[in-house]
Image: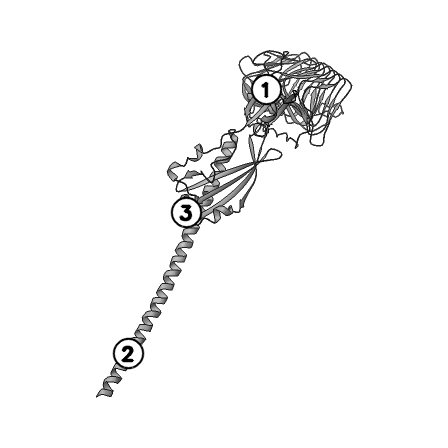
Amino acid sequence: MRNRSFARSTRRGSVLLACLGIVLTMAAMSALLLQLETTRARQQLFSADQKRALNLAEAGLAEAYYGLTVGLTGAVGTPGSPARFGDGLFWVEADELPNELISLESTGMCGVGRATLGLVVRRVPVSIASLGVMGGDRVTIGNRVLVDSYDSRESAAPTDEAPLSNSFRIQSNGDITVGGNARIEGDATPGPSGSVLLSTGATVTGATTPSAAPVTLPTIQTPQLPDKAFTNPLLPSQLALPSGEGAYGDVTILAGSKLTVTGPATLSIEELSIGAAAHLHFDTSAGPITLYVKDWLNLASTAQVTFSNRDPKLLTVMVAASQTQDRNGDLLPDPPVNFSYPGVFYGSLYAPQARLALPNGFEFFGALAAKDLALGGNSKVHFDVALETESNGEASAVNKLAWRVIDVPLEVARKFAPDPFEALGVDPDTLEKPADAHEDAGYMIHILYIDLSDMPRSYRGPESAFDWGQVKSVTKILRQLL
């Protein structure tokens, strides 16, 4: 009996051990399945958070780009004080690079997601005036030429005391050649490998230091305008291009005829030719005129050009022409721009793909830039600093160049907390919205001052790069937002 009881107990113990083994095996398998599901859930959550972080980084770039277009620096928030957006955050760092380039790096964080995107943009001039008086390839100044500046809001012509300007200077990506007894009342800035070549008696009152990088002449963006008809007259006639918007083909005015362009107007013309003894009149009494010339601008040496108003802010001529070819059937090649008429011009003139040569004795009031600029002997160019505040939409303010995904900063990648606010140690209730997190814009200054050695000096550039410790006294200073 005792042996039977012992055998039954042994069998029951074996069954119990087998059941316990099965239970433990199932528990291990359940734990493994639970771990797999937990890992899969975490991966899905990480993937979702990573997509949100990437979207936040893109939102940061968009916000920074908008800031640049309205004159801000492009920086939005900081790692210590990021911008809050939804249940995540971002910040954008902006670095100034040579040749007007700006590097933007935007980092977005949401949950456990981390992403950083980079964008390189180029800031370009928003008006002709921002180029000063410029010849992209070279500038050639004849004998006894005067180049100075004035402010049309204060006077109709230059006075003894020239106004300060952040834009006014003679500049080129190549050499600047100044003829005998010519005078430049300001800076002359050649290209990085260029020089200012002064003839006998020539004077430059400002700096002649070469630029650090070439200046890109922005391309002309001709707007889409409604087509309008124009009949070129064969007999002497009084003609007009009315106010409003319109796109015309060839407009040719011959001897004895007068063409009046009436503002306010935005016009584009394929070829504009004012022949010998013909008359072109700009009537800006009712509003400004912006004129785009696509293929050829011809103002003959005996043509007449007149203005109803002497305010350069009221007229902008944009010449996109670039080809030299026979245009009038005389079997001789015609340059894309023939600006030969003697007299006076009031306005902004821009020809980024053409050579522009002003005739001897010409007088120009406004802003002037071309691919190659030549000023005839005894001519005068008066830069109007009032144009610095004007933006006629000649070029976009910021151009996008390159976009890329870059590595998340190491100090951010190492912070594994699932809450981005906790990871950075910031209080979400104290963070600003993206629109309020932009960095204050810096200033461009043009300063005339006396240094510690009692020598007169001048400086033009970012105020952040100026050494105020060398200033004994300030003569004049002009600040503008970068």
Q: Position of residue 6 (x, y in %)?
A: 25, 84
Q: Give the quarter of the image for residue 481.
A: top right
User: Which image quarter is the C terminus in?
Assistant: top right
Closer to the eye: label 3 or 2: 2
Between disc 2 and disc 1, whose residue precedes? 2
Q: Position of residue 242 (x, y in %)?
A: 56, 17
* Residue closest to the eye, 8 or 139: 8
Read off the residue under disc 2.
13
**Which residue is at the far right?**
200
Between disc 3 and disc 2, whose residue precedes? 2
* Residue closest to the eye, 331 or 68: 68
Residue 170 in view, yes or no:
yes
Colour scheme employed for the rendering of this structure:
one colour
**Which residue is at the far left?**
1
Look at the picture and state if 408 lies above or below 340: below
Closer to the eye: label 3 or 1: 1
Look at the picture and state if 258 lies above or below 326: above
Which amino acid type is shown beneath numbered disc 1?
Val
Read off the residue under disc 1.
474
**Residue 363 marker:** none
**Residue 111 marker:** 3
Q: Position of residue 151 (x, y in %)?
A: 59, 15
Which amino acid type is shown beneath numbered disc 3?
Gly
